[in-house]
Amino acid sequence: MKGDMYLAWSKKEDLREKAGSGGALTEILKYLLESKKVDVVVTVKPITLYHGMPAVITEPKDLIDSAGVFYCVSENLPRLVKEYLNGAFDMKMAFVGRSCDIRAVIEIAKRNKINLENIILLGLSCTGTLSPAVAKEMAEKEFGVNPEEVAGHHIDEGKLTLILNDGKEITKDLKELEEKGFGRRDNCRRCEVPIPRMADLAFGRWGGEKKKATFIEVCSERGGEILNSAIQAGYLETEKPTSEEIKERAQKEQSAIELAHYWQERDFGEYKKMNLEERFEYWKSQFNQCIKCCGCRDACPICYCDECVLEPGRGVIKPGAVPPGWTFSIIRAFHVSDSCLNCGQCQEVCPSNIPLSRLIFMVNREIKEVFGYEPGVELEEKPPLARFEEKEKLIEEIELNFSALKG
Ligand code: SF4
Ligand code: SF4
């Protein structure tokens, strides 16, 4: 039942070895395909340590290719499901993703572009990903190793450990690395949801490291049924974690959340200490670097309109103008800010390196303070910009000041 926790292992030694922490997720995916509970598994397949690609798997034998730790991969799986797999309206799917992926799927489902009834959500605990270029440079400059010697990494309690091909481990303080511009992606640093409890099952290594087990938390009744069926069908070995193991996991989660809050304050504080005019000038100078490639819009899981108001001919943005004017970026930011998941996909694709997710997630946190809305958690909860409540008429203390926008 919901809240139950397990340590779990594949019964196959080669899979346990490749998966890094027990191989239980791969076995559950295998069970789901072999028992025909799903038609496809959507996950990521590593190409090298630093690169991966989305994988849509229909054959159980191919699942082994996706087992393991992904050092740098941040694929846009929710968008793939929406755009290329017809939102799972005509297939049963197991979807494997991190918190930001799972939350994006839920948020898209609220906009009726994904059919969540057909999707089993399997969440991976995550403390952040690194961009490939930064990871390679960091390996050389900070850890003194050839990037090709790195076999994996983990982040625990504010420390980043590189695991080398020969099994040797090197650990450094994560905050110090990130102060120097190394470490995780900008948005990952700010992520306060390391364990994806909005999924049906949450998988991770915290609490299971000493026994090389997968730590599984049951997050929904459906997740519990799937796990029990896979155990009864003989796909997994399990045991209950000890209170020490549960405590250790909770401590590591808490430490990750505290670090996220540090980075939120640090990143947003830079902007908040500017007055309104300075803030506006700063963002205008950023937006003036925009080349109107529309990559941010096309990557964002929350951008869902069939006909975008930013397209030429809609009368809002002047056709042919580059940069398109700051209203282009402001319109996009406003449109998604109530539901921004801090997934970072917009910033990742921006050729002009505009810190888009930093801005939009900052606005999102402020919207959360007003409306209490946390995106991508409850399917039934509607985004604030999509609903109106009578009591909002009574909110007097919030005053919008547009004076800085004049001229
Ligand atoms: Fe992700 Fe950027 Fe869209 Fe926010 S605005 S959900 S960070 S792509
Ligand atoms: Fe402009 Fe960057 Fe968005 Fe492209 S990705 S439209 S350059 S803000």
Image (cartoon, rainbow, N blue to C red):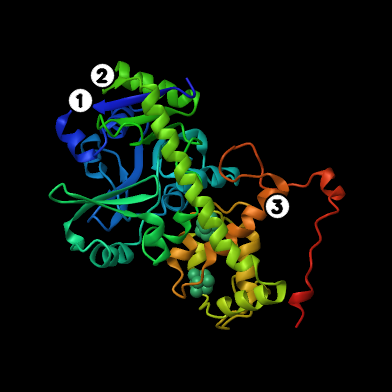
Name the residue type under label 3.
Answer: Leu
Can residue 191 be seen? Answer: no
Say which mark, if any, is on residue 234.
2
Percent x, y for residue 23?
26, 33
Going from the N terminus, do you reach mark 2 or mark 3 first?
2
How far apart, in angstroms, are the residues tagged by discs 1 and 3? 49 Å
Q: Tell whether circle 2 marks a residue whose Cβ is less than 8 angstroms from ligand 1.
A: no
Q: Identify which residue is drawn at 57% across, 80% down.
A: 288
Along the horizontal axis of the image, is 143 left or right of 274? left
Quadrant location of the C terminus? bottom right
From this view, report whether residue 194 is shown above or below residue 35. below
Along the horizontal axis of the image, is 282 left or right of 57? right
| Crowd class of label 3 (few under 14; some 14 to 19; many from 20; radius 10 Å) | few
| Crowd class of label 1 (few under 14; some 14 to 19; many from 20; radius 10 Å) | some
Q: Are marks 2 and 1 in contact (CB under 8 Å)?
A: yes
SS label for mark 1 = loop
SS label for mark 3 = helix
Q: Nearer the viewer, mark 2 or mark 1?
A: 1
Name the residue type under label 1.
Answer: Lys
Name the residue type under label 2.
Answer: Gly
Q: Which residue is mark 1?
A: 11
Q: Are marks 2 and 3 in contact (CB under 8 Å)?
A: no
Going from the N terminus, do you reach mark 1 or mark 3 first?
1
Q: Nearer the viewer, mark 1 or mark 3?
A: 1
Q: Identify which residue is drawn at 41% across, 39% down.
A: 252
Front-lying residue, 281 or 42:
281
Say which mark, if any, is on residue 385.
3
Residue 275, image quadrant: bottom right
Residue 216, image quadrant: top left
SS label for mark 2 = loop
Residue 183, image quadrant: bottom left
